[in-house]
Amino acid sequence: QVQLVESGGGLVQAGGSLRLSCSASGNIFSSNSMGWYRQAPGKQRELVATITSGGRTTYADSVKGRFTISRDNAKKTVYLQMNSLKAEDTAVYYCNLLQSTYRYWGQGTQVTVSS
């Protein structure tokens, strides 16, 4: 069983910053990919950023240069540093863990950017 617990969401003004954290527990493999997705009201869930256990990263074009994903393998934690936030970044952000063929999701954390 795998559990993902997110923290760090909140309300911020446009141009501000937030840092999300996601801690994983349970049967975590040494090789996996962790990441962040988001879902805005009325829209489909979309990928924000991912990072493998080896440190390889991917980003959505909309966040490149503004968001940075990182992880601490020893702590089984992934982070998302979000800078220069825009109103269109407002969404529920979900942590994701992919290992073997299984995908796990956190409960989500709300990020609201006021313009």
Image (cartoon, grey):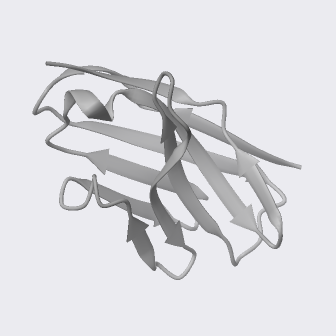
Viewer-proximal residue among 20 and 15:
15
Left or right, residue 78 beside residue 16: right
Q: Image quarter for residue 6?
A: top right
Viewer-proximal residue among 27 and 57:
57
- Counting every numbered tag in the picture gives 0
Name the residue: 89% across, 49% down.
1
Q: Quadrant of the C terminus?
A: top left
Please state the horizontal and vertical placement of residue 14, each as a whole percent of the image: 13, 27
Q: State whether residue 20 is above or below residue 25.
A: above
Please state the horizontal and vertical placement of residue 47, each as a whole percent of the image: 49, 53
Please state the horizontal and vertical placement of residue 3, each as a whole percent of the image: 76, 43
- Name the residue at the left extreme: 15
Name the residue: 33% across, 40% down.
19
Is residue 84 something that shows in the picture? yes
Q: State whether residue 111 is above or below residue 95.
A: above
Left or right, residue 63 beside residue 95: left
Name the residue: 61% across, 68% down.
33
Viewer-proximal residue among 36 and 89:
89
Name the residue: 66% across, 30% down.
107
Q: Image quarter for residue 100?
A: bottom right
Please state the horizontal and vertical placement of residue 24, each as a whole percent of the image: 67, 50
Left or right, residue 73 beside residue 110: right
- Name the residue at the right extreme: 1
